Image (spheres, rainbow, N blue to C red):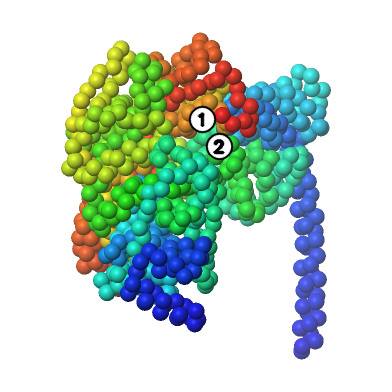
């Protein structure tokens, strides 16, 4: 009896052992086909970006990945790869190099579109096919392609780990902009390393289903991609207008989960307002923390779980500006209406300039910055960094100081300060009046006629 | 304890019967000098709680102390303890040491006494404690001598050795490396670091000159030229200044220090010259605290205070600001100050004479009323001035109580209340003090089985935090 069981098992395992071999070879074929559909459109991007992080304008080369969208040379990558690029060099899959120009970037979704200059290119451009990121399954096999650690044309493989990853809190790009609030993320265990940024996440049909954007330091096998449906929308807008305008109402939402009974709301209904930006359309409309939005412009809205919050933000962002929107809200347990008029959100961060002789970099102040850094208004110029060592650093000018006056001249904006700076020449002493966290401070910058050498003491 | 110390105790007993300057004449030279000073030196051991990012842990310290009063007054190094009572350390971002739960004093005979903690002088970081009445005359009292030193003069510094060592102190020879005038008058001892704080300094002749103190209240500052943290210089505080501090030990719970209610910046004469004003220094009023004495006196942000009670101010650099702050603080609440104020505008500079009546200094975070709720495992405390100042909050808009600590794994922690959150509402109830919060909590306890929703101020925004309550 026992012997029979044994031999039966042997036969069984042999029988089922045959079909995986067959399936595996088909599976391998499928991977090759998917690879071959995307690899020709994969590009290795070397932009030279400008940053102002050290208190001086500094160019430095970075490396990222991208994928070609059209035969006329439009390609998509991450904003944090090419969004601030001064010039871009791309290496195509046949290792030929072509220059490219920045078409536009959107920091809020971390997407940038570049256009390859194909005038001298002799090869054939094969754009990718974009898939549908709304019909993905957890566990589905995917390939990540790109240039991890600048190792170009690398392919890694894994599965979709989750289709709806939400990042709470405040994620910012290296250049300072808030990002990621309008979409959830695809999470994959296909290896994604620095340099993969902007490269495609591909299903086994060879369709691009996401743009690989971020990994997690000190973690393994956790990478995140922007779903391709978000990318499609943003790239279309960027190609048409060079930027993505969003509408702004000024509410911060919070999942309603477990708080329904306190706020007297039905389960699965409504979006809880956690806070309202000062001076925002929402504040003007009389919305307050603790109100629950049930309908936005007649459409039911709901965010019981955190993953549902980005869709609500996206709904606000895509509603037309300067047109009244009727909100049905629950305030103090009663259904009421509020009329809110969304305004254009504008740039998240302002433009940078290096005031080299004075020894600092500064940025124009946008409405969103004023809210973010709790400034009283957008008047003045925001100091991003004092160069170290340097005259402004010695004078104790600090990041976050808002320049209100130069000598006795009130400063309204960056352009005005730049004009004054250029007109001034080599003045020895400049007195800045700045606002620092509610305080007025005077900062006396002594230029000493020339630049101090690095490492040299005063 | 070994025989040597037992023998020492007998000697000490004899000494107290017949104290005198030349008791140790039998031994000679440096040893005599050591023995003489050793008798007034103590080591002070304390236990305290340190709170950092809402978590508390027990800490212990052993520092140099000195017997300074006939009534059992002991001073010791309060650098670590100072932050708890210093009103500027209100936020939860830096470690805060609570008042010590126990302080004990050990004399040169290795005899240990329990002492009562008094407080820490805000500017010198000198801590005070007092021996019990039964032992108040047990330790001989230090007498400080005013000696004029010159550059390069040698002094001897008593530096404490680790606990098990005998003798307790080693002598280190140091030289006066600078005669500081600004921000305060100090003899700098260049070879020494802040580690030497409170170490007694003795002249070659054996006269007690004072104790090592860091210059200004800043212990260290960032070196912009790549050296990392730079230790602040240490030196000997002038004896008259030390005597002033010793004459008025801080009184527990009594905030009699004067307070103007301004943020300030030093008036560099070069800044004043932009308005064609010639001054020897002064104070720029950077901000006026609402409803403060400064506001009542009519001061405005941007004003220059150039003289106090007719005396020109010589504050030229921010490093010298503590001198001014101390001057104001020492006047005490209720004192009247006559200020000479310049008010510059684009066209002209007005001169004003304003009278300001000092208020008492605001309560420190460590001294603010607090309440620990055992059901939520959370400690709340009243908001203090420093919270508003450090976080740039509008006192008219942000009212509530601060989440000071919470037990890891307690209901408050699980629900997501974070240290540093300002609780503005508990359920529908606004709370502006721990007293009110306590009332709300006690009502909640009777009302079982509900979720409790806190409205908090976090990251400069309001937010709701749901804490499920599981009453027993």
Horizontal side of residue B124 vs A357, given as left or right: left
Q: Position of residue B429 (x, y in %)?
A: 22, 53
Q: Is residue B420 visible?
A: no
**Residue A111's quadrant in the figure?**
top right
Can you give x and y, in whole percent of width and height, for residue B459 in the image?
40, 44
- Vertical placement of residue B454 versus A441, above or below: below
> Residue at point 72% right, 21% down?
A117
Of all chains, the one bearing label 2 is B
**Callouts 1 and 2 on one subunit:** no
In the rendered image, which quarter contains the C terminus of chain A? top right
Q: The disc numbered 1 marks a residue on which chain?
A: A
Note whether B320 is above or below B305 in the view shown: below
> Mark 1–mark 2 contact, CB under 8 Å?
yes
Can I make out residue B121 in this image?
yes
Q: Which mark is residue B224?
A: 2
The residue indicated by pointer 1 is A394
| In the rendered image, the vertical position of residue A121 relative to residue A68, given as above or below | above
């Amino acid at each position: 009896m026992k012997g029979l069981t044994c031999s039966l098992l042997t036969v069984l395992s042999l029988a089922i052992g045959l079909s995986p071999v067959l399936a595996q070879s088909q599976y391998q074929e499928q991977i090759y086909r998917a690879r071959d559909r995307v690899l020709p459109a994969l590009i290795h991007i070397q932009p030279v970006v400008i940053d102002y992080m050290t208190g001086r304008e500094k160019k430095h080369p970075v490396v990222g990945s991208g994928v070609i969208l059209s035969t006329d040379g439009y390609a998509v990558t991450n904003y944090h790869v090419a969004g601030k690029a001064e010039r871009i060099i791309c290496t195509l899959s046949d290792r030929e190099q072509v220059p490219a120009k920045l078409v536009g970037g959107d920091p809020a979704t971390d997407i940038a579109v570049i256009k390859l200059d194909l005038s001298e290119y002799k090869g054939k451009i094969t754009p990718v096919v974009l898939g549908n990121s709304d019909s993905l399954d957890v566990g589905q096999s995917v390939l990540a392609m790109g240039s991890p650690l600048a190792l170009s044309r690398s392919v890694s493989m894994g599965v979709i780990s989750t289709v709806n990853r939400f990042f709470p809190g405040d994620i910012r790009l290296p250049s300072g902009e808030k990002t990621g609030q309008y979409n959830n993320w695809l999470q994959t265990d296909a290896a994604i390393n620095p340099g993969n940024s902007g490269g495609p996440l591909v299903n086994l049909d060879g369709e691009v289903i996401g743009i690989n954007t971020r990994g997690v330091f000190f973690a393994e096998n956790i990478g995140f991609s922007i779903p391709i449906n978000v990318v499609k929308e943003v790239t279309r807008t960027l190609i048409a207008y060079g930027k993505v305008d969003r509408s702004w109402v000024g509410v911060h939402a919070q999942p309603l989960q477990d708080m329904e009974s306190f706020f007297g709301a039905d389960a699965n209904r409504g979006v809880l307002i956690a806070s309202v930006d000062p001076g925002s359309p929402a504040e003007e409309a009389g919305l307050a923390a603790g109100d629950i939005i049930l309908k936005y412009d007649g459409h039911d809205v709901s965010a019981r779980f955190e993953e549902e919050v980005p869709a609500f933000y996206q709904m606000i962002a895509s509603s037309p500006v300067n047109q009244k929107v009727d909100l049905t809200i629950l305030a103090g347990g009663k259904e009421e209406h509020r009329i809110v008029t969304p305004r254009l959100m504008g740039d998240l961060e302002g433009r940078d300039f290096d005031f080299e002789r004075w020894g600092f970099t500064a940025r124009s102040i946008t409405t969103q910055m004023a809210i973010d850094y709790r400034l009283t208004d957008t008047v003045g110029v925001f100091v991003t960094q004092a160069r170290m060592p340097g005259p402004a650093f010695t004078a104790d000018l600090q990041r976050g100081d808002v320049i209100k006056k130069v000598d006795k001249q009130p400063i309204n904006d960056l352009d005005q300060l730049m004009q004054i700076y250029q007109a001034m020449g080599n003045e020895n002493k400049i007195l800045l009046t700045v606002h620092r966290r509610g305080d007025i401070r005077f900062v006396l910058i002594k230029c000493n006629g020339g630049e101090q050498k690095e490492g040299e003491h005063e | 304890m070994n025989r040597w110390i037992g023998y020492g105790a007998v000697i000490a007993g004899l000494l107290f019967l017949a104290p005198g300057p030349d008791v140790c004449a039998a031994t000679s030279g440096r040893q005599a000098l050591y023995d003489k000073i050793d008798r007034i030196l103590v080591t002070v051991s304390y236990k305290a709680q340190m709170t950092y990012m809402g978590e508390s842990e027990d800490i212990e310290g052993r520092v140099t102390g000195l017997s300074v009063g006939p009534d059992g007054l002991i001073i010791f190094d309060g650098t670590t303890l100072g932050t708890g009572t210093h009103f500027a350390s209100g936020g939860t971002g830096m470690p805060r040491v609570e008042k010590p739960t126990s302080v004990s004093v050990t004399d040169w005979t290795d005899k240990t006494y329990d002492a009562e903690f008094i407080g820490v002088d805000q500017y010198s970081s000198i801590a005070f404690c007092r021996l019990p009445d039964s032992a108040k005359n047990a330790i001989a009292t230090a007498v400080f001598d005013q000696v004029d030193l010159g550059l390069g003069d040698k002094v001897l510094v008593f530096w404490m050795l680790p606990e098990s060592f005998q003798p307790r102190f080693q002598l280190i020879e140091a030289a006066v490396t600078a005669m500081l005038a600004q921000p305060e008058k100090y003899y700098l001892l260049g070879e020494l670091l802040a580690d030497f704080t409170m170490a007694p300094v003795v002249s070659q002749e054996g006269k007690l000159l004072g104790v090592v103190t860091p210059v200004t209240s800043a212990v260290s500052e960032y070196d912009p030229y790549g050296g990392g943290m730079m230790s602040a210089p240490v030196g000997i505080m002038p004896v008259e200044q030390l005597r002033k501090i010793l004459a008025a030990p801080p009184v527990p719970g009594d905030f009699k220090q004067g307070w103007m209610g301004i943020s300030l910046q030093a008036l560099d004469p070069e800044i004043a010259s932009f308005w064609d004003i010639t001054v020897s220094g002064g104070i720029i009023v950077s901000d006026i605290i609402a409803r403060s004495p400064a506001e009542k006196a009519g001061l405005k942000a941007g004003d220059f205070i150039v003289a106090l009670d007719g005396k020109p101010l010589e504050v030229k650099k921010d490093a010298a600001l503590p001198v001014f702050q101390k001057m104001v603080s020492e006047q005490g609440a209720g004192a009247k100050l006559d200020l000479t104020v310049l008010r510059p505008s684009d066209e002209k500079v007005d001169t004003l004479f304003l009278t300001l009546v000092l208020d008492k200094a605001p309560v420190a975070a460590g001294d603010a009323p607090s309440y620990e709720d055992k059901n939520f495992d959370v400690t709340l405390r009243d908001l203090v001035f420093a919270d508003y100042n450090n976080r740039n909050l509008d006192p008219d808009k942000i009212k509530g109580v601060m989440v000071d600590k919470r037990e890891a794994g307690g209901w408050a922690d699980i629900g997501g209340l974070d240290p540093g959150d300002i609780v503005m509402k508990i359920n529908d109830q606004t709370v502006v003090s721990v007293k009110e919060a306590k009332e709300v909590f006690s009502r909640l306890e009777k009302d079982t089985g509900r979720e409790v929703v806190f409205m908090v101020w976090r990251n400069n925004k309001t937010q709701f935090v749901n804490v499920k309550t599981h009453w027993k």
